[in-house]
Amino acid sequence: MKNKKIPIAKLGKSHGVRGWQKIHILSDFPEQFKPGATFSSNREPLTIEKIDLKKGLVKIKGIDTPEDAKKITNRMLFTTEEETRENIKLKEGEYFWFDIEGCEVYENAQLKKEGDGFELVKSESPLKLGKVREIERADVDYLLIDTDEKLVKAGYPKRFMIDFKRHVKDVDVENKKITADGAVDILESLK
């Protein structure tokens, strides 16, 4: 999966008469867009000649007229996990989305039989709640989690979402494990 293409920008409409065009950045790391940087696209690789991040404009090498720019409008720019790790230095508490996806989510809880059904209650030992399917971005980053099969059989939904900043307490990307707090409450409210 290291060579899987990760979309990081989309080229928009032409701007001016010298081949500049809008760039719609889909990445949290705009610093990777700099003169000389080459990215794969839907077709051939494209190299940034000049960029103005404040105005959201880019000049691609070899694109010198509005007509040239129109030919690559809507083209996606891609990177790979390997290139991302090489080009981006993370700060403490930052993670790449591709490292978060696939992590198992745990919380200190247990599944307890309650009458005809089940209930999740707090406990001292961790319970696997599910696995991160993907990250959804709205005003905040949400983890979309595929609920563990044992919990689905107990009547909980097949998927649920948690707010990354609010509910994630610890991330261990090496062991693909996330410790949550409050996810159990969300699951209970969806039952």
Image (tube, grey):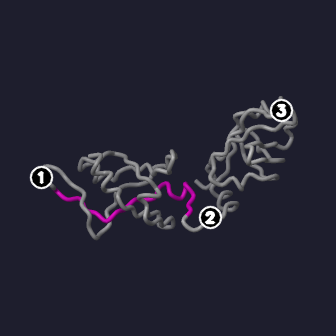
Magenta stretch encompasses residue 95: yes
Indicate the position of residue 3 as horizontal and vertical percent values: 63, 52
Asked if marks 3 and 2 touch (Cβ < 8 Å), the reply is: no
- Lower sequence index among marks 2 and 1: 2
Indicate the position of residue 171 as horizontal and vertical percent values: 47, 65
Give the residue at x 29% y 69%. Answer: 125
* Residue 46 occupies quadrant: top right
Whether residue 96 sits left or right of residue 89 in the image: it is left
Residue hosting label 2: 90
Residue hosting label 1: 115
Indicate the position of residue 151 as horizontal and vertical percent values: 28, 52
Indicate the position of residue 38 as horizontal and vertical percent values: 77, 50
Give the residue at x 83% y 47%. Answer: 50
Residue hosting label 3: 68
User: Could you say which disc has been placed on residue 92 in the image?
Assistant: none
Whether residue 146 sits left or right of residue 141 in the image: it is left
Give the amino acid type for the residue marked by disc 1 in the picture.
Gly
Estimate how packed mark 3 is, as few (under 14), some (14 to 19) or many (20 or more) residues with alpha carbons within 10 Å. Answer: some
* Local SS, label 1: loop
**Front residue of this view, candidates 29 and 8:** 29
Whether residue 169 sits left or right of residue 92 in the image: it is left
- Lower sequence index among marks 3 and 1: 3
Estimate how packed mark 2 is, as few (under 14), some (14 to 19) or many (20 or more) residues with alpha carbons within 10 Å. Answer: few
**Depth-wise, is mark 3 or mark 2 nearer the camera?**
2
Magenta stretch encompasses residue 124: no
Estimate how packed mark 1 is, as few (under 14), some (14 to 19) or many (20 or more) residues with alpha carbons within 10 Å. Answer: few
Magenta-colored span:
94-113
Give the amino acid type for the residue marked by disc 2 in the picture.
Leu
